[in-house]
Amino acid sequence: MRHARELGFEIEPIRQLLTLSGHPGSSCEGADEIARAHLADIDHKIARLTALRVEIARMADCTNSSVDTCRVIEVLGDHGRCVADHH
């Protein structure tokens, strides 16, 4: 199950998968549920990272010449200036 760690599965789901693998004649429904839950977690992380990327790219596109009007500094100092909610 080392490959499961490489695929990003946490320890508890790996333990559950190991338990399921000890019953080769059983339904794979439990394993499918674990994989779907992991996929949903990955999708959530991708969405969050995508929103963060958009925000950072917007911040970094600062054309001001001094720190007192710098978009990066403004956004970092005031969450209200962010375009997306990235909590």
Image (cartoon, grey):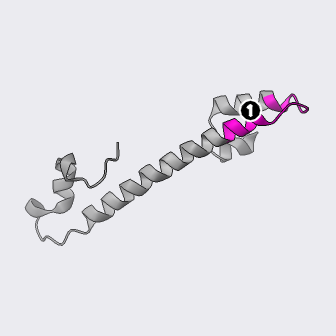
Q: Is residue 53 above or below residue 31?
A: below
Residue at (55, 42) in percent of width and height: 41
How packed mark 1 is, by other alpha carbons closer than 10 Å (few <14, some 14-19, many 20 or more), is few
- Left-right relation of 75 to 13: left
**The image quarter in which residue 25 lies:** top right
The residue that mark 1 highlights is 30
- Left-right relation of 69 to 12: left
Assess whether residue 55 is covered by the magenta stretch.
Answer: no
Assess whether residue 25 is covered by the magenta stretch.
Answer: yes
Q: Position of residue 11 (x, y in %)?
A: 65, 32
Q: Nearer the viewer, residue 15 or 44?
A: 44
State the extent of the magenta-drawn residues as a range.
Answer: 20-35
Q: Is residue 26 above or below residue 71?
A: above
Say which quadrant the C terminus sits in.
Answer: top left
Residue at (65, 42) in percent of width and height: 36
Q: Is residue 22 above or below residue 60?
A: above
